[in-house]
Image: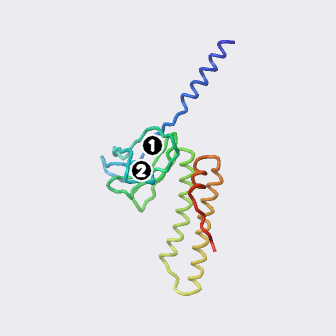
Amino acid sequence: MKTKLLYGLATVSLLLSCQSNSFQINGIARALQEGDTICLAYDEEPESAFAQTTVSEGKFVFAGETDAFRLCRVYAKQQPDCSATFFSEPGHITIELYPRPAISRVSGTPCNNEWQHLSDSIQLLAKDIVYILRHPATDTLAQQRNVHTIDSLHRRMSACILHTAQRNCDNPLGRYILDNYKKPEFK
């Protein structure tokens, strides 16, 4: 009986010690040069990097502890538009960093996978809006159609954001969206 209790306690101890707030970011930056500096900052303070590393063989790594779910930004110091936005959360995070116009990607943890899914959806809809804006209508009827289409795409973007929040209402991503997203008032 005592042996079973000891094994049970040892197992619980092991499980609890494995749960931590540690994260590791494995980055891919093939478009950057060897030795380029990569900065890690909170999104609301991007100029105040709290960690830096360098590109080595097209890759970079960050590791640390996180005690809060926060929106962060990783970027190339010499090319700040070569960046990715992600959430700090325990686990292994993969970031593919590309200069614009290419789109950087994030994956690996539950909330960051959902964040990337949302970002992909918004990018797809935004591409249609950009196309319409780059090809203006030549008559009033076509212009009205374009306005209606853009409004519809904007509504779909808002619905994607709200749906992601609802789908993730039981985790920090859903709460983050609900706390920070202000749904537009459509006419």
Q: Decide which of 87, 101 is in the foreground and name it.
A: 87
Q: SS at mark 2?
A: strand
Q: Which residue position holds label 2?
A: 74
Residue 66: x and y in percent read 48, 40
Residue furthest right in the image: 1
Q: Decide which of 50, 134 is in the foreground and name it.
A: 50
Which three-letter amino acid code belongs to the residue tagged 2?
A: Val
Query: At 59% from the left edge and 82% from the top edge, which residue is drawn?
Result: 144
- Image: 153 above or below 91: below
Residue furthest bottom in the image: 139
Query: At 31% from the left edge and 49% from the top edge, which residue is drawn?
Result: 36
Image quadrant holding the N terminus, namely: top right
Labels 2 and 1: the sequence-earlier one: 1
Circle 2/circle 1 CB separation < 8 Å: yes
Task: Tell whether 145 sits left or right of 71.
Answer: right
Residue 126: x and y in percent read 53, 66
Residue 95: x and y in percent read 45, 48
Q: Quadrant of residue 150?
A: bottom right
How many C-alpha atoms fall within 10 Å of the one at disc 1: few (<14), some, or many (≥20)?
Answer: many
Q: Nearer the viewer, mark 2 or mark 1?
A: 2
Q: SS at mark 1?
A: strand
Image quadrant holding the C terminus, namely: bottom right
Which three-letter amino acid code belongs to the residue tagged 1?
A: Ile
Task: Tell whether 34 sits left or right of 17.
Answer: left
Q: CA distance from mark 2 to mark 1?
A: 10 Å
- Image: 79 above or below 68: below
